Amino acid sequence: MANDSTNIHLLFQKVLGNTANEQELIAFLHLLDNPDIREEWMQFREWEAVEVHSLPEGLQERMASRMEGKPGKTPAAKTSSVYRRIIPYAAAVAVLLVAVWWWHTPSAPVMLASATTSSGEIRTITLPDSTVVTLNARSALRYLENRKTGERIAELEGQGFFEVRNHPGRPFAVHSKGLRTVVLGTRFDVRTYPGITPKIAVADGKVKVAGPNGQFAILGKGNAATYDTTTATFSQFSENPDQVATWQHKLLNLDGLTLKEVCTILENEYNVNIRLQPGIEKLALSGQQPHSSISRTLTSICFVFQLKFEQTGNTFVITKQ
């Protein structure tokens, strides 16, 4: 079809009326490769009010097949799942908008798995790339893959221990609370609960963790780092690789934590509220503490600092003796 104004107008009307056939829809999409035509098309207010109709039976599959085979674009095998989910339920207009977006923007990561844990729950999952992740209590994980770059992305809330399977050319990155930890194949722990200083510790291999403003730290086996969100700085230190994820065995690693942070961890673990008397929040703890129950754990901590606690329902109040 020639690209004169009359033919373009007729083609637009057919698409608006949902009467365009397969060849006409594809011709319309090719027209949108022209930025001048796209700009003019975007001014058509009738697109906003067009009635929604499904594409004719069989047309959506043929469109998907033709679109997936467009030269220079992502191979069909990598886009078919997206198109076959979208097209059968979309109006012709929506399909075109999706297609235009696909042509003119980089391919976005696709979510392939997700998992969450509740209070007191520890859960181990295997991701589609064979990476094994153990999630601590009150944590959430989304796993995505960028089909264009091959990058594997884990979006974490809370705490997780990662045993990453190495795939050459396919880096693995953990995004959590503004931090980005990149690895190839390693075992490491990421903790980014709200109210607790973010921490990354490496049990084996090497990782690079970057902050939101370009700061970064390189950590090897037996290294750990915390991130100060106020000063935007990393603090590195040594940590026994065997103690990187003691929480999986119901052992609470207190090193470097304040009483306030420990109480936040216990709140996540036992689904309780813990209130502290003003002035004791920043007491520094160290060592390891088994936590088979909230009462036993608080009793041990209070003994060290000559504190006491009272319980009312699910609320614990810790004060000086």
Image (spheres, rainbow, N blue to C red):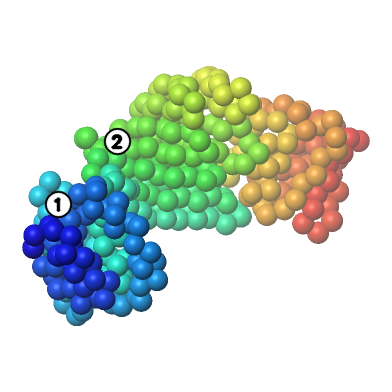
Of tags 2 and 1, the one toward the viewer is 1
Residue beneath the point at 39% across and 35% down: 187
- For label 1, the residue is 75
Q: Could you say whether the residue bearing mark 2 is in a helix, strand or loop?
A: loop
Q: Distance between the residues labelled 2 and 1?
A: 21 Å
Whether the residues at callouts 2 and 1 have beta carbons within 8 Å, the answer is: no
Residue type at mark 2? Pro
Q: Tell me where residue 65 appears, x and y as whole percent.
A: 13, 64
114 vs 93: above or below: above
For the C terminus, which image quadrant?
top right
Residue sticking out furthest to the right: 321
Return the disc, 2 or 1, that comes first in the chain's sequence. 1
For the N terminus, which image quadrant?
bottom left
Q: Could you say whether the residue bearing mark 1 is in a helix, strand or loop?
A: loop
6 vs 211: above or below: below
> Residue 76's quadrant in the figure?
bottom left
Indicate left or right for 126 with 117 as reference: left
Residue beneath the point at 57% across and 57% down: 118
Residue beneath the point at 32% across and 66% down: 94
Q: Tell me where residue 27 appears, x and y as whole percent.
A: 13, 61
> Mark 1: few, some, or many residues within 10 Å (few <14, many ≥20)?
some
* Residue nearest the observer in this picture, 57 or 92: 92
150 vs 279: above or below: below
- For label 2, the residue is 171
* Residue nearest the observer in this picture, 9 or 156: 9
* Residue nearest the observer in this picture, 133 or 230: 230
Indicate left or right for 182 with 316 as reference: left
Residue 268 visible, this orientation:
yes
Q: Tell me where residue 288 appears, x and y as whole percent.
A: 63, 33
> Residue 233's quadrant in the figure?
top right
Q: How many labels does the image show?
A: 2
Residue beneath the point at 78% across and 33% down: 281
